[in-house]
Image (cartoon, grey):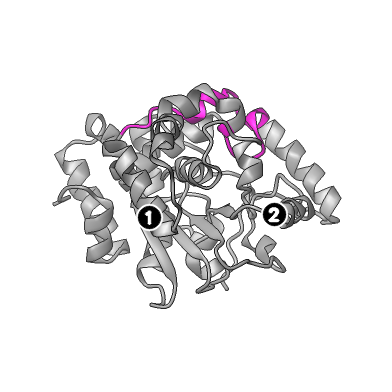
Amino acid sequence: MRRYETSMYDSNRWDGFELRPGDIIISTPPKCGTTWTQMICALLILQEPELPLPLDTLSPWIDMVTRARTDVFADLEAQTHRRFIKTHTPLDGIPNDPTVTYICVGRDPRDVGLSIDRHIDNTDIGAFLSQRKRAAAIDGIELGPLRPPRPRPDGERDRFWQWVDDETPSTQVGSSLRRTVEHLQTFRDAADDLDIMYVHYDDLKADLEGQMRQMAARLGIDVDEHRWPRLVQAATFESMRNRADTTVPAGGPEHWIDPTAFFSRGTSGQWRDLLDDADLARYAARVRALASDDLVEWVHREPID
């Protein structure tokens, strides 16, 4: 397996983890609807609108370095319900097991680029570093120096193009256009014996209940009809934002300057107000150089050129 390592996560943390038949692995690029999909899985599996524990505890991010790996493994080992695990590692960096189900979630990369920009601004770096140090001490890991972050341009448009044009290898960067589409491409190129479910952010926006019913059917989960209205309501973007203290990922609300801002807009097509025709042509050329035609067509809900 390839190793994906940044200051915030390390795919080597999967080493030694024992999967169970029926496990669900939610593997998405950042800002593509990961937390939303985790919430849907929690509601379908537990079938109650109120979660018994924070979502990040029920569905931990194994790769994330702000929680001790020993604690994450212990939490997952103790779970008796069907497990659903989060990762931002592509398929070639995690165990490939035909007995589990992988959920790959995609989103228009132009919206991803704008969303990650706000995500960076909302991260409490001091809290992150403190949690990272504490987790490493529990696991007995000696931390190396952090890579210095690249300077971010002042303007939103310039930051978007920095994200689009970033050529850093996907194994060494948390988010970029290259990283986003290469992650999705690992699933498009997956072996036929793997059970992979594809979900698109815009489909969740357009028909949340329909998508939840499809996911339940695909996962083999029976839901009594009377439960559906409350489960769907609990999965709405607004409901998740209102319960940000228990739904935000990456170690909980202390990791964010404003936990509710993690659920910033939840809209599609944000790029329309930023990019002109020349920008769109430039973007189309870049994304087509990085991804297969079928992936480009799937991840964008309308033709890009």
- Which is more toward the observer, 292 or 200? 200
The foreground one among 305 and 36 is: 36
Magenta stretch in the rendered image: 247-267
The residue at which mark 2 appears reads as 76
Identify the residue at image location x=35%, y=47%: 213
Which SS class for mark 1? helix
Q: Which mark is residue 217?
A: 1
Q: Is residue 250 magenta?
A: yes
Residue 85, horizontal then vertical, whole percent: 58, 54
Which quadrant is the N terminus positioned in? bottom right
Name the residue: 49% across, 56% down.
27
Q: Of marks 2 and 1, which one's residue comes earlier in the chain?
A: 2
Label 2 SS: helix
In this view, the residue in front, 217 or 28, is 217
- Identify the amino acid type marked 1: Ala
Asked whether, in this view, residue 302 is left or right of residue 161, the answer is left
Question: Label 2, label 1: how many angstroms apart (C-alpha)?
Answer: 24 Å
